[in-house]
Image (spheres, helix red, strand yellow):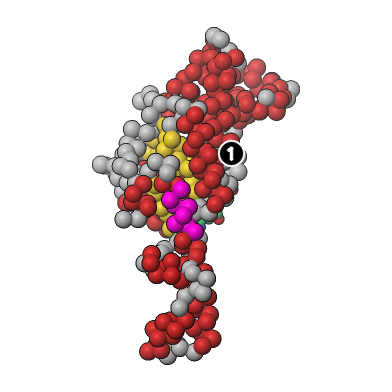
Amino acid sequence: MTNADRARTKSDWSAVRLHVVTGKGGTGKTTVAGALALALAAGGARPGERRILLVEVEGRQGVAQLFDTPPVPYEERRVAVTPDGGEVWALAIDAEQALLEYLDMFYKLGPAARALRRFGAIDFATTIAPGIRDVLLTGKTCEAVRRRAAPDAGRVFDYDAVVMDAPPTGRITRFLGVNSEVSGLARVGPIRNQADAVMRVLTSAQTAVHFVTLLEEMPVQETLDGFAELRDAGLPAGGVIVNQARPVVLPEDRLKKAAEPGGLDRAELALGLGPVGLADPEVVEALAELGTEHARRVLLESGQRDLLAEVGAPLYELPLLAEGVDRVGLDTLAGELHRQGAA
Ligand SMILES: Nc1ncnc2c1ncn2[C@@H]1O[C@H](COP(=O)(O)OP(=O)(O)OP(=O)(O)O)[C@@H](O)[C@H]1O
Ligand SMILES: [Mg+2]
């Protein structure tokens, strides 16, 4: 049994309506969030039955790039359809637009809000109090999670689940917890109610915060720290998704031997290569060096996997796609997530 199997406690995210995908910068948060959205969108009983919203909060249009679509405006747009008709919609949440919407919703200030924008009050508000930005981003996300579309709501509809391409590990707990600070500041009134409603979603079993990592020291350490912080803050931890995992081609005892100071056994290798006419000493030496490096890296990775297993969260592993991540690759990753029970 591999470490991954040992750590893979049975996971059931079927009750989860908000999947938050975090991780160290560059480890594959956007990619994994997209693959998870596709995996969740598939498998409906009827064509088109399932609809997933993928939200982006960092204003970088990473989702549009991922699905190779034009930039997503502050409006929900369909970006992908699964073979069985499930749909992935995307929304790039913009703090300023969310603030206007918020003012409009709570204070019926339509024209006044537009005037506020003219006078730069919104810039002022979102710059002077960076927390406000996060309140708006989480607030809008939770609105989509809680939404129950009225039959006559036109294009506004509800989703089976929302996947958030979230800020990186170092900021995630603060980002998700910001509403509890607001709730502490505003004793009563609509702001207090809104902050409380957001925290109710974010601290409930409706939410799961997943960590994407590579099998390298830094991202693994960030994942361990991130989990601890999240749990301390009372936020619901989800799974660990190891991204860009490389296949292991040798059994463990062979790997250990090959990783020893002398490296892979040249004589043995030459014996194996002889029958196919590749026993030339230079070829043997080059292959031995490659094999030794592979063995050492795999063992290092295995050590990192052991550390991750200690988190006690379900562990998933996605392969490194040699051709990069296009739509076919995304479907492969989504299929893996489904096969391993994440969606
Ligand atoms: N499984 C994979 N196989 C091959 N390439 C991958 C895989 N996952 C991600 N990548 C590539 O790695 C790069 C980083 O991925 P991605 O943009 O998803 O990371 P991120 O964590 O969202 O980054 P950022 O912190 O900048 O938002 C991209 O070029 C992406 O195509
Ligand atoms: Mg990203």
Q: Residue furthest right?
A: 119
Q: Nearer the viewer, residue 228 or 166?
A: 228
Q: Residues within 10 Å of mark 1 (few under 14, many from 20)?
A: some
Quadrant in which residue 163 is drawn = top left
Residue 141 appears in the rendering: no
State the quadrant of the N terminus.
bottom left
Amino acid type assigned to the residue bearing label 1 in the image? Gly
Q: Nearer the viewer, residue 266 or 320?
A: 266
Q: Residue furthest front?
A: 261
Which residue is located at x 46 percent, y 48 percent?
307
Percent position of residue 323, x then y: 49, 64
Percent position of residue 127, x then y: 70, 28
Residue 218 appears in the rendering: yes
Q: Is residue 337 left or right of residue 71?
A: left
Which residue is located at x 60 percent, y 43 percent?
60
Q: Which residue in the structure is indicated by mark 1?
A: 170
State the quadrant of the C terminus.
top left
